[in-house]
Image (spheres, rainbow, N blue to C red):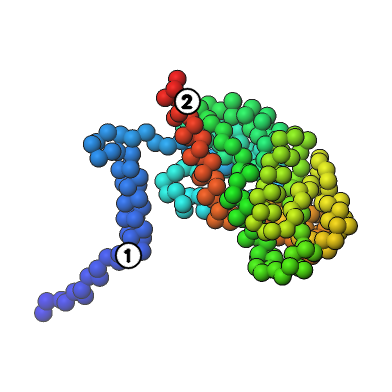
């Protein structure tokens, strides 16, 4: 008799791994094809976008800026998005720029006004980068910030409809970090005016440090004017010590920091595009 042999088992194929590999290859190929125009000419790759965060000892701040970076990537697939901090958190901005090597970059400060960091710290760090860099404007003032502030207030319980008596009794303190630079105060006041136009109640800028009035002082001044329903609008990009202190002073309600709101991601890309267009205009006129 001829010995019977058991049928050979077919090699097992991991369909999930295969699909993942094919998707990865397809994504890489699509990224390369985007660099080639329909006539076959290779396009210039866009500069990397580097989000420049201040840094904080509060772990929620790092989580927030990482989430914001992910939202930016979702809005602009294929754009290299990196993160660098001025202090306190890794990666520090000089390390991020060094890791980019000869890749040009646009630095978008996650700061809400002009001040020392925008005028001194970040340009000095950028000047030491091995590749060309361009510094975008800070995020504020801008209507997209006001859109975010309004949404955060609504999330905190700000009424969508107010009767006249309630409106006359209501006000908002725009709580910001503060700076000794007068341009910073100018930018914050501009945001306060834009928010007041949207809400239809007074919005007073106040500060956690380095500038006046302080948040408690602003609250007392509004109360003395008959504004007993005072909300705190948190004008901070991420949670931290100052944001927490300001929220604790709220006599009525306090909104969350701006965070990774979708409008913030759109604003980051707007500042990035602004800086690129300005650079291209300078090259044309040179």
SS label for mark 1: helix
Q: Which residue sits at x=60%, y=33%?
A: 94
Q: Which residue sits at x=35%, y=45%?
A: 31
The picture places residue 160, in percent across and down from the top left corner, at 65, 68
Q: Is residue 209 above or below residue 221?
A: above
Q: Which residue is mark 2?
A: 282
Q: Which residue sits at x=52%, y=50%?
A: 266
Q: Which residue is mark 1?
A: 15
Would residue 71 be found to the left or right of residue 233 on screen?
Answer: left
Would residue 198 be found to the left or right of residue 272 on screen?
Answer: right
The picture places residue 76, in percent across and down from the top left corner, at 44, 48
Crowd around label 1: few <14 · some 14–19 · many ≥20 (10 Å): few
Looking at the picture, tell me which residue is in the foreground, 89 or 273: 273
Image quadrant occupied by the N terminus: bottom left
The picture places residue 105, in percent across and down from the top left corner, at 50, 34
Q: Which residue sits at x=51%, y=45%?
A: 269
Dividing the picture into quadrants, the one containing residue 89 is top right
Image quadrant occupied by the C terminus: top left
């Amino acid at each position: 008799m001829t010995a019977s042999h058991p049928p050979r088992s077919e090699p097992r194929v991991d369909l999930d791994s295969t699909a993942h590999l094919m998707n990865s290859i397809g994504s890489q190929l699509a990224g390369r094809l985007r660099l080639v125009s329909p006539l076959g000419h290779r396009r210039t790759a866009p500069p990397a976008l580097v989000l420049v965060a201040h840094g904080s000892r509060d772990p929620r701040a790092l989580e927030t800026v990482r989430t914001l970076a992910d939202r930016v990537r979702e809005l602009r697939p294929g754009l290299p998005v990196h993160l660098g901090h001025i202090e306190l958190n890794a990666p520090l901005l000089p390390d991020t720029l060094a890791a980019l090597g000869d890749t040009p970059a646009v630095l978008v400060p996650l700061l809400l006004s002009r001040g020392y960091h925008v005028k001194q710290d970040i340009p000095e760090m950028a000047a030491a980068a091995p590749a060309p860099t361009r510094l975008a404007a800070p995020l504020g003032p801008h209507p997209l910030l006001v859109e975010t502030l309004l949404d955060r207030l609504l999330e905190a319980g700000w009424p969508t409809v107010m009767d006249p008596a309630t409106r006359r009794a209501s006000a908002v303190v725009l709580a910001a970090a503060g700076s000794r630079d007068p341009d910073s105060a100018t930018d914050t006041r501009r945001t306060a005016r834009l928010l007041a136009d949207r809400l239809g109640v007074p919005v007073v800028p106040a500060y956690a440090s380095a500038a006046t009035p302080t948040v408690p002082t602003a609250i007392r001044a509004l109360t003395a004017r008959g504004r007993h329903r005072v909300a705190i609008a948190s004008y901070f990009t991420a949670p931290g010590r100052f944001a927490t202190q300001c929220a604790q002073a709220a006599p009525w309600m306090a909104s969350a920091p701006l965070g990774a709101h979708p409008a913030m991601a759109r604003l980051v890309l707007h500042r990035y595009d602004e800086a690129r267009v300005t650079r291209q205009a300078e090259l044309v006129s040179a």
